[in-house]
Amino acid sequence: LVQKAAAWREVARRIAHEIKNPITPIKLSAQRLLRRFKTRFEDTDREVFEICIRTIIHQVDSLRNMVNEFSKFSQQPTIRLEEGNISDILFEVISLFRVSYADIEFKADGVEKVPTFLLDKDQINRVFVNLITNSVFALKGRPDPYIECFAQYDPAKHIVRVGIADNGCGIPHEVQSRV
């Protein structure tokens, strides 16, 4: 499984590299066309020419952003461990979502203050944002939508359990084995 993941990361890295190669020359060529030939057209023709060139430039920038995101997949993120509290991170993420989704009830009664430990705050934050975002999408069109979060410390096992649940549509049965 580790070898498979490494192989896929290498494939992603190479694909991203091959896509990036022609992006800069395409954008530079479009910008050059705009500068050089813009004055050779009049009225509607000039407008169409500018719109087409600006569309090419915009789409190249969009493609570059997509390739950059794809490149990130090919890299193992660097783990930056520091003392932190997972409950605090969860509360911060819940607070952000409460502001953006006032129609959803966010229940955080089960979020206990847990001991601090070494963790990567950015990556834990990203996990919570992704999970709650998935919950928000699962709640579309549901009456009385809510997202319930909990964090509990089990001192006997020295572990923290975190849960995020919603009353949304759930994961389709045919997809569950891939989750």
Image: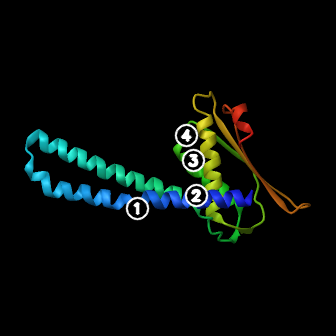
**Amino acid found under the numbered disc labelled 3:** Phe
Judge the density around disc 2: few (<14), some (14-19), many (≥20) Cα neighbours within 10 Å.
few
Q: Answer with mark 4 or mark 2, whichever residue precedes in sequence.
A: 2
Foreground residue, 26 or 156?
26
Q: Earlier in the sequence, mark 3 or mark 4?
A: 3
Q: Earlier in the sequence, mark 2 or mark 1?
A: 2
Which of labels 3 and 2 is toward the front?
2
Label 4 sits on a secondary structure element that is loop
Is residue 110 in view from this perspective?
Answer: no
Q: Position of residue 11 (x, y in %)?
A: 58, 58
Distance from disc 4 to disc 2, alpha carbons, whole Å, reads: 42 Å
Image quadrant where one finds the N terminus = bottom right
Task: Give neighbour class at mark 4: few <14, some 14-19, many 20+ (Cα, 10 Å).
Answer: few
In the picture shown, does residue 5 fall above or below 42? below
Residue identified by numbered label 4: 102
| Residue at 69% in and 32% down | 172
Instruction: Answer left or right for 5 relative to 112.
Output: left
Label 3 neighbour load within 10 Å: few <14, some 14-19, many 20+:
some
Q: Which mark is residue 90?
A: none
Q: Where is residue 76 in the image (x, y as percent from the top left)?
A: 63, 64
Check if mark 3's residue and mark 2's residue have beta carbons within 8 Å.
no
Residue 11 circle label: 2
